[in-house]
Image: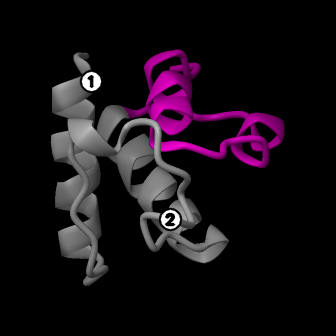
Amino acid sequence: MSTQNIISLINKVAKVNNLRIQVSEADLDKGLRELGLDSLTVVSIVVGVENELKIRIADEALGQIKTLRELIYELEHANA
């Protein structure tokens, strides 16, 4: 799945969960907090994307994610 497709999916999950965020490729190297994403919001988004893609990110990896690029990397390399 491409970076743009994952960004679109993140935005879709955020909208479904009534989260007022919108990310783009221009935001890849911004910190998650800089994008307005606290840890609870990140978990909500990750769970939604995991459910959509039928994947799982390791809990240890989730705690280490600091930027949108790192989040996308983990989603791309998650276990099915």
Label 1–label 2 contact, CB within 8 A:
no
Q: Which residue is painted at 28% across and 71% down in the image?
A: 21
Q: Which portion, as a residue range, is magenta?
A: 54-80
Quadrant showing the N terminus: top left
Q: In the picture shown, does residue 62 fall above or below 11?
A: above
Where does residue 49 sit, x and y in percent of width and height?
37, 46
Quarter of the figure with residue 22: bottom left
Q: Which residue type does callout 1 highlight?
A: Thr
- Residue tagged by mark 1? 3
Where does residue 79 sit, x and y in percent of width and height?
58, 19
SS at circle 1: helix
Where does residue 17 sit, x and y in percent of width and height?
29, 77
Q: Which residue is painted at 26% across and 60% down in the image?
A: 13
- Residue tagged by mark 2? 34
Q: Is residue 56 left or right of residue 9?
A: right
Q: Which residue is painted at 53% across and 15% down in the image?
A: 77
Q: Residue 21 has which mark?
A: none
Q: Which sits earlier in the primary sequence, circle 1 or circle 2?
A: 1
Q: Was residue 69 drawn as part of the magenta stretch in this picture?
A: yes
SS at circle 2: loop
Q: In the picture shown, does residue 30 fall above or below 42?
A: above
Q: Nearer the viewer, residue 56 or 70?
A: 70
Q: Residues within 10 Å of mark 2 (few under 14, many from 20)?
A: few
From the viewer's perspective, is the residue at label 1 or at label 2 nearer? 2
